[in-house]
Amino acid sequence: MKPVQTALQKWMRENENFKETYARVKQEVVNDPEIKEFLSLHPELTQKEIDKNLIKLYEYKSQTKQCTACKSFDSCVNMLQGYSPILHVENNEIHLSYEKCHSRLDYEKQKKQQKLIQSLYMPKEIMEATIADIDSNPERSNAVRELLSFVERAKNGVPQKGIYFYGPFGVGKTYFLGALANKLKEFNVSSTLIYMPEFVREIKASMKDDSFNDKVEFFKKADVLMLDDIGAEMQSAWFRDEILGSILQYRMMERLPVFFTSNYSLDQLEKHLATTRGGVELVKAGRIIERMKQVCKEVEINGNNRRN
């Protein structure tokens, strides 16, 4: 089979109209300001080399460079979405390559950050929460201060203690967790948000499909673990001691923070955790609370019920 270039040259000789078009396109290419500048910087390039790579030069001319003609990544007009063409010379030969443009880099960063928040059974409103949208009325000012303090310290590494937010129904405790998770992803810190009642069911169900150990290990080692509405789940001694206790023990030893929300204060939660179907176990419940105090700081949130 003859080389494509030889066949193309023969076709050009036989087609005068194409030759005229070719000549016009060539003129447009070599007169393009960016290509003229490129050629002026490489006087070693021969006319033969330029003619041989006219298609590359035309491709470069026709593509937008670093988002100059694109409003966003989705509206990119280039052949390779999100990539900008680069001309360079190696061994006196013209080469065309592509590099990621600003929009592509921003897009990939956003996708990576989205993956930093892993959630079980959290509503969309919580996953889109922002600290800027938290109103700091006097009843919530202390909680907001503690949240912002954690964020500030997290810029230099994840602090070893989280926060135990407690207060009445509907005051925005879960929203605080979502807002924090979204802020932490800006520092490439991953967060795992868990709604406790569903978490209990998830763990129990995992015993049937051999994923139990993997799931417990995942929660143990998450950068920032957030347990929403602790105390609302159906209490069992097995989950309290073998699952929650194990996770808290690991995170306490490894100095990894845990965030909680609850309608109970820690003292009230201790009484709740002590009562199981097997009776009242104050010592075991007390052990869980002591571990919690090692991984979080108790902070009250008050205010109006926003669900009404």
Image: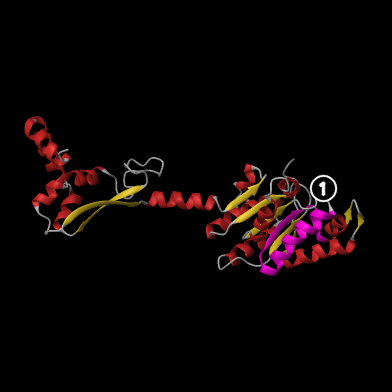
* Residue 73 picture location, percent across and down: 40, 44
Which quarter of the picture shows residue 91? bottom left
Left or right: where 63 falls relative to 185: left
Instruction: Indicate whether 38 appears above or below 287.
Output: above
The colour scheme is secondary structure
State whether residue 31 appears in this view. no
Category of crowding for the residue at label 1, using alpha-carbon neighbours closer than 10 angstroms: few (below 14), some (14–19), many (at least 20)? few
Q: Quadrant of the N terminus?
A: top left
Q: Which residue is more in the foreground, 135 or 298? A: 298
Q: Residue 207 or 200: which is nearer the viewer?
A: 207
Give, as a single range, the part of the protein colored magenta.
237-266
For label 1, the residue is 234
- In reply to whether residue 247 is colored magenta, the answer given is yes
| Type of amino acid under label 1 | Met
The image position of residue 51, as x and y in percent, is 12, 46
State how many labels appear: 1
Q: Which quadrant of the structure image shows residue 162? A: bottom right
The quadrant in which the C terminus is found is: top right
One can see residue 207 in this view: yes
Q: Residue at x 31, y 41 (%)?
A: 79
Q: Residue furthest front?
A: 1
Residue 23: where, in percent of width, then height? 10, 39
Instruction: Specify whether residue 218 is painted magenta.
Output: no
Residue displayed at 34% across by 48% down: 83
Which structural element holds mark 1?
loop
The secondary structure that most of the magenta stretch takes on is: helix
Q: Nearer the viewer, residue 38 or 90?
A: 90
Along the horizontal axis of the image, is 132 left or right of 83? right
Query: Residue 290's spot in the image, x, y percent?
Result: 79, 66
Q: Is residue 73 left or right of residue 245?
A: left
